[in-house]
Amino acid sequence: MFTKNKLTLALLACLLLLAILAIKVINQTQFFFDTPIWLFLYSTRTNLLNNLMKLVSFLGMYGVIFVSGFILIYLFIKNKKYLALVFMAILGFGEVINVLFKNLVKRPRPIISPLVIEKDFGFPSG
């Protein structure tokens, strides 16, 4: 079982990694793996995979809301209102941080024939 100190250390390590990546992206650093990954992904497109990825994107957006709602209902039923409040705060704080980072970094999304046109920036992915 993780202790609070180990969890805190893991959180700080994740934040440091995110900060390093953000600084590199802000400085317009092209990662060595960007182009090969994009080219590989676009070369493997099929109608089936396209529909699967649209489903994954949909679940990533709405599935999180749906599952989070069930978790909140469960926590309230079990009379764990404090945990429900902490859970809601974490979700809200995560969304705020994501939007702030997107508008700070302003990394454009790849433009090679996107499946879905997104209006926000590409980093962090959320």
Image (cartoon, rainbow, N blue to C red):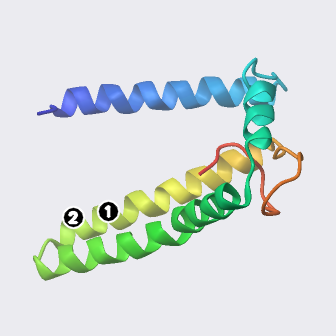
Between the residue at mark 1 and the residue at mark 2, the CA separation in whole angstroms equals 6 Å
Query: Going 43% across and 61% down the picture, which residue do you hit?
Result: 91
Considering the numbered disc 2 on the image, is that residue within a helix, a strand or a loop?
A: helix
Q: Is residue 67 visible?
A: yes
Left or right: residue 75 versus residue 27 is left
Badge 2 amino acid = Leu
The reply to whether callout 1 and callout 2 are in contact (CB within 8 Å) is yes
Indicate the quadrant containing the N terminus: top left, top right, bottom left or bottom right. Answer: top left
Query: Going 79% across and 61% down the picture, which residue do you hit?
Result: 118
Nearer-the-camera pick, 31 or 121: 31
Nearer-the-camera pick, 102 or 65: 65
Query: Going 73% across and 23% down the picture, which residue do you hit?
Result: 24
Q: Is residue 46 above or below residue 44?
A: below
Q: Quadrant of residue 19?
A: top right
Q: Few, some or many C-alpha atoms within 10 Å of disc 1 (few <14, some 14-19, many ≥20)?
A: some
Q: Please state the horizontal and vertical placement of residue 21, each as a whole percent of the image.
A: 65, 27
Question: Mark 2 highlights which residue?
Answer: 83
Left or right: residue 9 versus residue 123 is left
Q: Quadrant of residue 8?
A: top left
Q: Please state the horizontal and vertical placement of residue 73, each as a whole percent of the image.
A: 25, 80
Query: Going 37% across and 67% down the picture, which residue do you hit?
Result: 88
Q: Please state the horizontal and vertical placement of residue 54, each as a whole percent of the image.
A: 65, 64
Q: Please state the horizontal and vertical placement of residue 15, each as a whole percent of the image.
A: 49, 32
Question: Mark 1 highlights which residue?
Answer: 87
